[in-house]
Each structure stands twice: as C-alpha cells, then as structure tokens.
Image (tube, grey):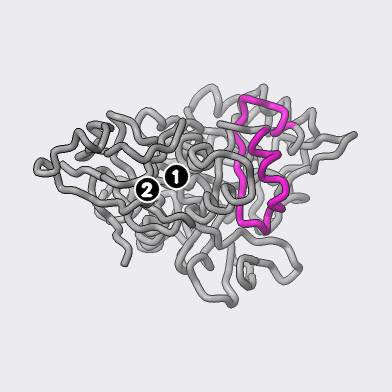
C-alpha cells in the first residue's frame, strides 16, 4: 500500500493541501494527513506539488515518430510509453482517413496491444477513428483520396475496438449511419471535418451524435447569421466538445468563453501527430508531407496538420489563459473525458474505489511522477 503526502490534491470540485491519498491498485482512502501512520505505507512525498488524476487523451494520432495509422503494435507501444511521461494514464490511439485496408491493419495492431497488457505505458481505452466518413470540403490535413461514404456496418464490425468516430452529418447516408450506430453500439459519435449548417448539426445531435471533434477546426464557423457547427456545439449543453489548447489552433482569447459555455462538457485533447516530442523538421501525416516549426505543423499548402501539443501542457495553457479554476481545467483533461467515453466509474478523478491513476506535477504542469493502477510507471529526474 502506498500513500501520497504533502501535495496539493486536485479533486473534482476543489484543490486541497491538507489531505493524503492511500492506494494500492485502487484508491483506498483520502484523509487528513495527520491521520496517516507513515510506518504502514510506502510514502510518496509530493513536496508541495500538485497531485492530480491521471490525464486522458481521447484524440492523439502520433508521438515520438510513431503514428497509430502505421498499423504496428510497436509504434503504438512507443506512443503509450512516451505519453505516460506527460501524465497521460489512458488514451485513444487515433486513426485518420487512410485506406480501409490500412485502417483495419491499424485496428488489429491496437487491438492486439490492448489485449496483451505487455507494455508499460498508458492504458489503451480503444480507437478514435477520425474518418474516413468526412466532407472533402473540410478534409483539412486528411488525404482526400481515401474519404468514403458513411458505412455503419464497418463501424459495427469493429465496435469491439472503436471507442469513438468522426462523421460529417451533412453527407449522403450520414444521418442513417448515425442512427444505426447509436442504436446498435455504445460508440461515441462525433461531428467533425464537416460543412454542416447549424440546423444539420442539430439534427445530427438529435439523431445520436454526442461529441464534436476539435472545435473551430475543420468545420463551419460561428457567424451571427449562420451559427454553423461551432454555434451548434456551443449552444447544446448535452454535447461534449474537444479543444486543442496549444494557443495556435484556437486563440487564447476564446478560452474563457468556451470554458464558460461548455463547462463539464469540455474535453481537452492534443490532436498530436508523429512530430510530437521530436525536433523541428519534415514529417508525414496520412502519407502527406508536413513541416514542424515550434508548435506549428503545416502542409506545403499552409493547411494546419495536427499538433505537437502534450496534454499536461494543454492543461497549463488553458488554466493560464482562462478564468476556470484549476480543478475545472484538470477535469477537462480527465473526468469530463472519462464521462464522454463512459469510463468515469473507473477513472477520471481521485475518488475512493477508482483506479489509482495519478500524476504529480509542478506549477507549470511538468510531470514529476505518473502512477498507473497503483504502480509508479514514470518518475522524473
């Protein structure tokens, strides 16, 4: 049994400085630190740093030169072992619009790794399939030659590994696909890479969509006469919404506004690709060449191509540039995501009975330690 003491504990509704956390595989007790008999436990001294629930990245394509769409378990394992150093304890390897054969190869490799439990990194929850059922007019950095018409049978065939997928509701057959998947699976359906009107987006929500892929990016914009998908996402209290808080994809001046509008339905993501954690230079995404310079990743035509954001820095950025409380921002990268994915009974917050997925971080959310299921999986220098 372990016990974390001397930390600023980030609970779902407050931050407290006088509490200790006792855990083995699951969290056993949260109590006043003076109640702890230190002779009974392996003591972890947080040294005044933040003690937070492990983060959950529901939308990440790649990291450290690997990509989920490459179709290799080794690459996904490399990603899992890399992002745990960023405080991420659960994640959804995210595929993009590649060929059906490549998608199924990627699903197989992720499925095999998820079921093996032989890797040391962040826990795989399932696949986030971002495409191929998107609108060519809003494909962004997705390769257009592999875009397909909506196919509910394809999604249902892989419902054991797909946790969520993106669709453009305005394209032919999309509404029927949404209804079919919603009726027959527990998969979270997301609107994204879409040219939908405000009304089409609302119809998609009513038919079974519950989520919005990277708000503002690759969708119809908010206008006072045409609210678009952005307006639909912000107006519905029942729809969870992704947000890339790298200060490049979305201007930091909007952070407080979106946080106030979406509250517990806001989910911070990275949308990171293989250049994440790597030096500046040229990389690929879905077979397309791009250049990474600092926090910017661009195709040759200037199209934004994912990010190199880490989720711990997304938390720091959003907290720094919004008026949300720290526990509320951390929820955006943990509890809110767990609720969206239907796993909040097990993970997403520091509560008795939940898995001991915990991370310790400094004031800028640099990671000092990551604990997965009660086991220390990363310890900083």
- The quarter of the picture where the C terminus appears is bottom left
In reply to whether residue 350 is colored magenta, the answer given is no
- The numbered dot on residue 137 is none
- Label 2 crowding class (10 Å Cα cut-off): few <14, some 14-19, many 20+? many
Judge from the rendering whether residue 123 lies leftward or rightward of residue 231; answer left or right. Answer: left
Camera-side residue: 364 or 152? 364
Residue at 58% over, 53% down: 317
Question: What is the x, y in percent for residue 114?
Answer: 33, 47
Q: Label 1: state its secondary structure.
A: strand
Q: Are marks 1 and 2 in contact (CB under 8 Å)?
A: yes
Q: CA distance from mark 1 to mark 2?
A: 6 Å
In this view, the residue farthest toward the left is: 39
Q: Label 2: state its secondary structure.
A: strand
Question: What is the x, y in percent for residue 135?
Answer: 73, 46
Residue at 53% over, 68% down: 275
In this view, the residue farthest toward the right is: 225
Q: Which residue was labeled with disc 1?
A: 56
Work out whether mark 1 precedes mark 2 in sequence or the reverse, and give the earlier one. Answer: 1
Which region of the structure is painted magenta? 232-260
In reply to whether residue 258 is colored magenta, the answer given is yes
Question: What is the x, y in percent for residue 159?
Answer: 45, 35
Question: What is the x, y in percent for residue 88?
Answer: 41, 50
- The numbered dot on residue 89 is 2
Camera-side residue: 322 or 206? 322
Camera-side residue: 151 or 92? 92
Quarter where residue 35 is shown: top left
């Amino acid at each position: 049994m372990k016990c974390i003491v001397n930390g600023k504990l980030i609970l779902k509704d407050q931050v407290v400085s006088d509490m200790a956390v006792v855990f083995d595989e699951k969290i056993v007790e949260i109590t006043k630190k003076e109640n702890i008999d230190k002779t009974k436990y392996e003591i972890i001294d947080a040294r005044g740093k933040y003690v937070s629930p492990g983060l959950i990245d529901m939308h990440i394509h790649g990291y450290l030169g690997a990509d989920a769409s490459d179709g290799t378990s080794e690459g996904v394992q490399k990603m899992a072992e890399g992002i745990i150093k960023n405080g991420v304890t659960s994640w959804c390897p995210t595929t993009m619009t590649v060929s059906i054969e490549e998608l199924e190869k990627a699903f197989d490799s992720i499925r095999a790794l998820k079921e093996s439990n032989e890797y040391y990194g962040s826990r795989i929850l399932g696949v986030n399939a971002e495409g191929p059922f998107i609108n060519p007019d809003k494909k962004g950095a997705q390769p257009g030659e592999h875009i397909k018409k909506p196919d509910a049978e394809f999604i249902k065939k892989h419902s054991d590994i797909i946790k969520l997928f993106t669709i453009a509701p305005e394209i032919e057959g999309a509404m029927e696909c949404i209804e079919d998947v919603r009726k027959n699976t527990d998969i979270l359906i997301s609107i994204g890479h879409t040219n939908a009107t405000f009304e089409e987006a609302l119809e998609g929500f009513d038919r079974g969509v519950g989520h919005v892929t990277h708000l503002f990016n690759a969708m119809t914009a908010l206008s006072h006469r045409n609210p678009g998908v952005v307006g639909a996402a912000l107006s519905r209290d029942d729809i969870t919404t992704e947000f890339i808080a790298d200060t490049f994809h979305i201007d930091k001046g909007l952070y407080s506004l979106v946080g106030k509008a979406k509250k517990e339905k806001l989910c911070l993501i990275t949308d990171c690709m293989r250049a994440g954690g790597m030096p500046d230079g040229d990389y690929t995404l879905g077979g397309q060449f791009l250049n990474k310079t600092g926090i910017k990743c661009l195709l040759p035509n200037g199209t934004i191509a994912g990010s190199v954001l880490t989720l711990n820095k997304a938390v720091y950025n959003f907290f720094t540039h919004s008026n949300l409380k720290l526990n509320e921002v951390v929820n955006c990268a943990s509890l809110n995501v767990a609720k969206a994915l239907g796993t909040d009974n097990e993970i997403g917050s520091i509560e008795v009975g939940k898995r001991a997925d915990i991370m310790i971080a400094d004031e800028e959310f640099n990671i000092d330690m990551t604990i997965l299921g009660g086991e220390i999986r990363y310890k900083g220098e």
